[in-house]
Image: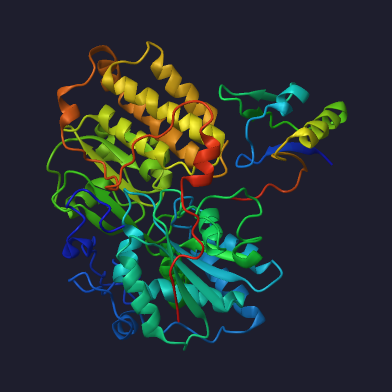
Amino acid sequence: MSHRLRLNPIACEAHGMCAELLPERITLDEWGYPVLDDEPLDGAVLDHAKRAAAACPTFALLVERERERSRT
Amino acid sequence: MSGTFPTAEFSTADELTRVYERPPQPADPAGAGSLPRLLRGVPAAGDALELDRHLDVHGELPHERRRRRSAAAELIEQVERAGLRGRGGAGFPTGAKLRAVAARRGRPIVVVNAAEGEPASDKDRVLCQLAPHLMLDGAVAVAHALGAREAIVGVCESSSGAETLARAIAERGAGDGVQIELSTVPTGYVAGQESALVSHLNGGPALPTFTPPMPFEQGVRRRPTMLSNAETFANVALIARHGPDWFRALGTADQPGSTLVTLSGSLAAPAVYEIEYGTSLRALIDAAGGLLAPVRAVLLGGYAGTWVDGAALAELALSDAQLTRHGASLGAGVVALLSDAACPVAETARVTRWLAGESAGQCGPCVHGLGALAGTISELAAGVASHDAEQRVESLSRLVRRRGACAHPDGTARFALSAIEVFRDEFADHARHGACERCSAPAELPLPAHERVLPRSSGRARASSRAGARPRTLSGERAVR
């Protein structure tokens, strides 16, 4: 079962904690909003990702089990 | 969208009824290959096709499929075989959407999206105003097939179609066994986005929400929601009556049927036309009485769409399979011609500023990214941009993609990028010499009269913009029958 990062862009307020805690997968744009890597998370990275999601002050960062991608 | 066009070309009723007529062929007794379909029989005066006239023209909707388990399967199969695609711009196969809703647990709700927020499109308003019953028939057919008891039509509060729709709904009475409600939606570019419409119908603001859950999973009142564009439902009504083979007698293999396009620009008769998919742009222009000025470029798909150089005009055919060669698609049927009398740089700057102002103000990359994009393009237009401004437009366009709750940043980025590409010479000229003599020419691309001044600067203006920018609308005005 693989996991991926997902961001609720409406909830995100650019605190930037996630990029501190998961620099291998998250960078910040010029306004401080996270840019996510879309690769699957595994092993140690998954643990870091879960920690980053838990640290997000607005609960905007999510670690999701991969499900069938929703259609648009 | 009536009243939102600054230009006069959309305002007279008789122009709205112009359709690209193709007479029935002799060997085609059922009229499958003839146009118009959606606008068949509409009065020339621009009034709605009233219920009894509508039934004369189109016949009764087949009703025996109510309340049977096989009913859903039957209509869905017909729609699938017809190859109908959604007409709101994304072109998702309607049969697959119906199937997804039917597979969910719980009684579904049907939502007809006529909340057309695209200023360059007028076709949903025209459909509501001229042929409201065909669209309502489609909603009723879908409701019966899915076992839904309610259908809600969401329409722009500023649309003149709203009144016609309210009358049409009242005219039908309760005979269909489906309660049809009308909900007026605040006017706005993103208010017609499907999650925004669902949010509005749930008593929230008419702004996009974080998805999934998608409306088909959990939409209005948390029920599975069959939400599609108004024109999609009108086509379902035709398929329910005539079947998939009839439907496929017009159009292309990928995009069967006819569609409504909003043609604007320096033409004798800019208006909404019903065309067969695959019709050449030349033929459409001829049907509109021909060009009044040479065409510099064609905008396809609206302000989330793509520019194509006017030099390619003769080879353009209006189907996605054809347009994709030019990197474009038909979207919700917008074909906007820009004449060589207008300044494409000034037009691009004006529309991009408007698009940035139409951000719901919810997602950081959209608020800041589109603001920066509009600012950079405006600087380019004024000749005060830094030397790398065009690269800045390109990198901003890449940066905002897929980073909003809805596709507004993506669409605006696409529009800006294709403008930079197609109008490369004009942008270079502006960068060197500033405003040109055509910059002061009358604006050609339609924008609502309430064009907003770009309110954003850099920094953190978000908290306030989120709390106060748009009034929270509780229910709109609903005409419940």
Horizontally, residue B50 falls left or right of residue B114, namely left
- Residue at the bottom extreme of this rendering: B175
Horizontally, residue B380 falls left or right of residue B290, namely right
Can residue B117 be seen here? yes
Above or below: residue B181 compared with residue B357: below
Q: Position of residue A27 (x, y in %)?
A: 66, 23
Instruction: State the quadrant of the C terminus of chain B.
Output: bottom left
Q: Position of residue B147 (x, y in %)?
A: 61, 78
Tell me how the rendering is colored.
rainbow
Q: Position of residue B440 (x, y in %)?
A: 16, 30
Query: Foreground residue, B82 or B98?
Result: B98
Can residue B328 be seen here? no
Above or below: residue A33 compared with residue A60: above
Q: Residue at x 50, y 30 (%)?
A: B368
Above or below: residue B2 compared with residue B208: below
Instruction: State the quadrant of the N terminus of chain B.
Output: bottom left
Query: Foreground residue, B310 or B123?
Result: B123
Q: Residue at x 40, y 34 (%)?
A: B455
**Hey, which quadrant is residue B253 in on the image?**
bottom left
Query: Foreground residue, B58 or B325?
Result: B58
Q: Position of residue B209 (x, y in %)?
A: 58, 50
- Count numbered badges in the picture: 0
**Hey, which quadrant is residue B430 in on the image?**
top left
Horizontally, residue B445 falls left or right of residue B138, namely left
Above or below: residue B234 compared with residue B89: below
Horizontally, residue B104 falls left or right of residue B158, namely right
